[in-house]
Image (cartoon, helix red, strand yellow):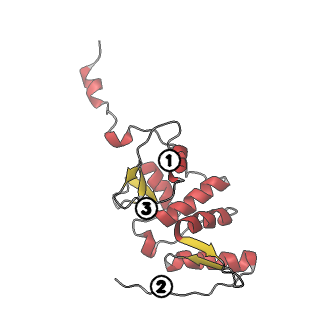
């Protein structure tokens, strides 16, 4: 016996919400892994303008590990595009709101201002580097570190390297051919 009126108020999980995600993952960035993941999300992630979903794309095999962290002990599907790019989609308004507290906006690649947890800056930068940067050195040449991103992101990285490591950056704008 059940009350039909009460039953009709229950919502069945949508297809997108069949998998359980840690809804408090970004509530408190309290370890190196979370800070790294936040930096990687800044580089290769995005939130939708509707504020209902965040996603992370990568060509790296580590995306399966990240998927297992976000969706522990589940077989959450990873979208694979024809280009080989892999994407994890997370449908959660709560997670999107938490990301917004760290500067995420739907057009963060152009206008976002990163808010990086104090004490975890180097781990955030490592995540950013994995997504939007590289380090290389030719034999007998100086070490080169490249980051790409909007001006606010690059200012943060430049300031961190200068104040914490006494390393000066030379800024170069990429030649964009649209």
Question: Total number of numbered labels?
Answer: 3
Q: Are marks 2 and 1 in contact (CB under 8 Å)?
A: no
Q: Residue 174's mark?
A: 2
On screen, residue 51 above or below 13: below
Q: Percent position (x, y) of residue 151?
A: 51, 80
Q: Do the residues bearing badges 3 and 1 touch, measured as CB atoms within 8 Å?
A: no
Give the class, few, some or many, for how many residues have Cα within 10 Å of label 2's Cα (few <14, many ≥20): few
Q: Quadrant of the N terminus?
A: top left
| Residue at (41, 48) in percent of width and height | 78
> Could you tell which of marks 2 and 3 lies nearer the N-terminus?
3
Q: Secondary structure at mark 2?
A: loop
CA distance for labels 3 and 1: 16 Å
> What is the secondary structure assignment of the residue under circle 3?
strand
Going by the image, does 25 lie left or right of 86? right
Of 57 and 60, the residue lying toward us: 60
Q: Which residue is mark 1?
A: 67
Q: Can you give x and y, in whole percent of width and height, for residue 152 in the image?
A: 53, 77
156 above or below 20?
below
* Separation of marks 2 and 1 at Cα, in angstroms: 32 Å
**Mark 1 or mark 3, which is nearer the start of the sequence?**
3
Q: Is residue 133 left or right of residue 14?
A: right
| Real-space CA distance between mark 2 and mark 3, rounded to the nearest whole angstrom | 22 Å
The residue identified by callout 3 is 46
Labelled disc at residue 143? none
The residue depicted at 66 percent of the width and 66 percent of the height is 121
Q: Residue at x 64, y 84 (%)?
A: 169
Q: Nearer the viewer, residue 89 or 13?
A: 89
């Amino acid at each position: 016996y059940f009350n039909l009126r009460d039953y009709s108020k229950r919502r069945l999980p949508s297809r997108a919400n069949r998998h359980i995600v840690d809804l408090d993952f970004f509530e408190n960035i309290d370890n190196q892994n979370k800070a790294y993941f936040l930096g990687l999300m800044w580089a290769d992630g995005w939130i939708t303008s509707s504020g209902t979903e965040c996603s992370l794309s990568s060509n790296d095999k580590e995306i399966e590990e990240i998927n297992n962290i976000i969706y522990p002990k589940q077989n959450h599907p990873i979208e694979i595009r024809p280009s080989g790019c892999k994407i994890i989609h997370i449908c959660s308004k709560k997670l999107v709101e938490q990301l917004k507290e760290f500067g995420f906006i739907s057009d963060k690649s152009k206008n976002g201002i990163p808010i990086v947890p104090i004490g975890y800056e180097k781990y955030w930068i490592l995540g950013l580097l994995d997504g939007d940067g590289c380090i290389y050195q030719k034999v007998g040449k100086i070490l080169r570190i490249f980051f790409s991103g909007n001006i606010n992101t690059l200012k943060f990285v430049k300031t961190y390297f200068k104040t914490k490591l006494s390393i000066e950056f030379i800024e170069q704008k990429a030649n964009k051919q649209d």
